[in-house]
Amino acid sequence: MLTALAPAAPAFADPWDEAGLLLSQVTAAREGGDLAKVVSIYQQAAELLAQGKERDEPLALMIRADLQRDLARAMADAQSGDPCAALAQGERLLEQAHDLTGPAQDAQLAEGMAFGADQIAREQKRQRCKSIALPVDPGMPDAALVGHYYLSGVMETGSELRLKADGRFDWYISYGAVDQMAAGRWGRSGNKVTLVPDEPAADAPLFRADQRFAWNEDAERRMRELAEDKAAEAASALCPWNVAAAMSAPMLLPEDRPPATKADVAAAQKALAAAELARDAASSAVAAALGAGPIEASASERATAAMDIWHNARQAMEDAYRAADMAVPDIGTPAMPPACTPQRADYRASIPESEWQKSVAVIVGDPARELRLSRVGVVFIYDDGHRETGHTSRGGWAFAPARKGAAVNTLVLSFPKPVDRSQTLSIAPMVHGIQTIIADTRQIEEPPFAQMRLDVRDGDLLPEDMPRGRYSRN
């Protein structure tokens, strides 16, 4: 929110401007794995905001409260400072904002304060900053109800519930694009069954190192494919006109095609000449746009326009040849510079071990949920101080190059926004190989319900908050 306040010049008329510039450095520090610097930036920014001329206005107080929440998260990630003290300060700032607005408060401000208070409360719960209420007693498990249940009666919703003899349950639901799951304790009291989901353990790590494997052919193949994906993305950014050709019109059946005339043949030949001319013009425009130096906007626009003309001309040629009942000639496509057309290797064949390039890899996943996680930030820190920054791709893989005489001994892993949490892991030095990382994704989301109550009826379970829903055993 505050990064927009950063001025273009280094001279600051207000501490809020300086705080905005400081906060613009948070992302780079977090991606670089310097969690101590993230904490320091938030602390300095909080001090500056307290000095600003607008420090006591309701909106300013809300912004300062949000910053205290971010500071608390950073402290927890860096294992530095007292997150609970920062959250308590955030609470006090929101209370001040509420007192200043009074009963006739602006609806948007009220909504913002309610959201901020909810976020701080969630973080206090996660950090165990306040005494947690005694857990709900679901009652004793009933052996007569143990079994696997399936939901019926709710349209476009699939759900399963498994009640175990030891008093534990597993629950899953899917509706639309939403999938939720929970596990915890269950019991029966009278004619009611109560499900109480587990809360993440207070001292459970968000990430932890698991097994390690030697470099293998699968890792080599994935590393090369990922490098090719990045090259393709770079080519797409460099050559915005490098797009697929327009779709050809469907072929007419012989009985639907009108007889061709001499005029149709002449039109096809004219369209052919126009398409060849457009093809060559597009080739020249693309070559000029890339050139030897930085791409000029005007040259890039001319290349894009030339490619559009080529696509339209080729489509017109194809239409004209079909109308003339003639085979469409293959005139090729505009010549693309090598930078626009990175080559892909065929990795279906075996890659000999003698050709392996070998690197350092991590695989991030949550085996409890059978998930591999993409978009997790990974900073590889070598024992010589060098750092490589990346993100997990499909399948949860991230790679860093092997360095002669150095080994990776530290990883910094980060969930992207809105979770925005990080953790530093020390690992045994690794020159090349594969380190698997287990992520506890339960910690980054609230349980889908605090408790679920179901009525027992004829051996089935009817959830109170799901009209017409019924869990039945098969």
Image (tube, rainbow, N blue to C red):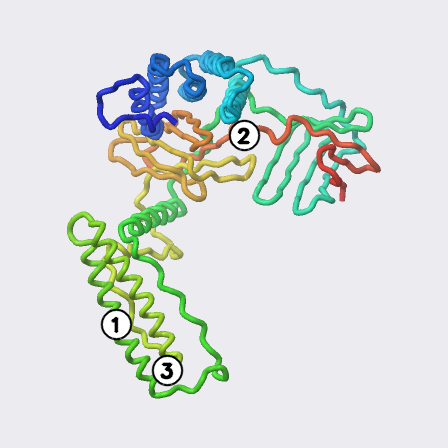
- What residue would you read off at disc 2? 445
| Residue located at (38% from left, 57% from top) | 349
Amino acid type of disc 2? Glu
Question: As drawn, which residue projects farthest toward the front?
Answer: 104
Q: Quadrant of the N terminus?
A: top left
- What residue would you read off at disc 1? 276
* Visible residue check, residue 111: yes
Q: Residues within 10 Å of mark 1 (few under 14, many from 20)?
A: some
Q: Secondary structure at mark 3?
A: loop
In this image, 177 relative to 55: left or right?
A: right
For this rendering, which residue is in front, 464 or 162? 464
| Residue located at (37% from left, 13% from top) | 50
Q: Which sits earlier in the primary sequence, circle 3 or circle 1?
A: 1
Count numbered badges in the picture: 3
Amino acid type of disc 3? Met
- What residue would you read off at disc 3? 326
Task: Specify the quadrant of the image occupied by residue 137.
Answer: top right
Label 1 near label 3: C-beta < 8 Å?
A: no
Residue 157 location in percent, x, y? 66, 44
Tell me the CA gap for discs 2 and 1: 58 Å
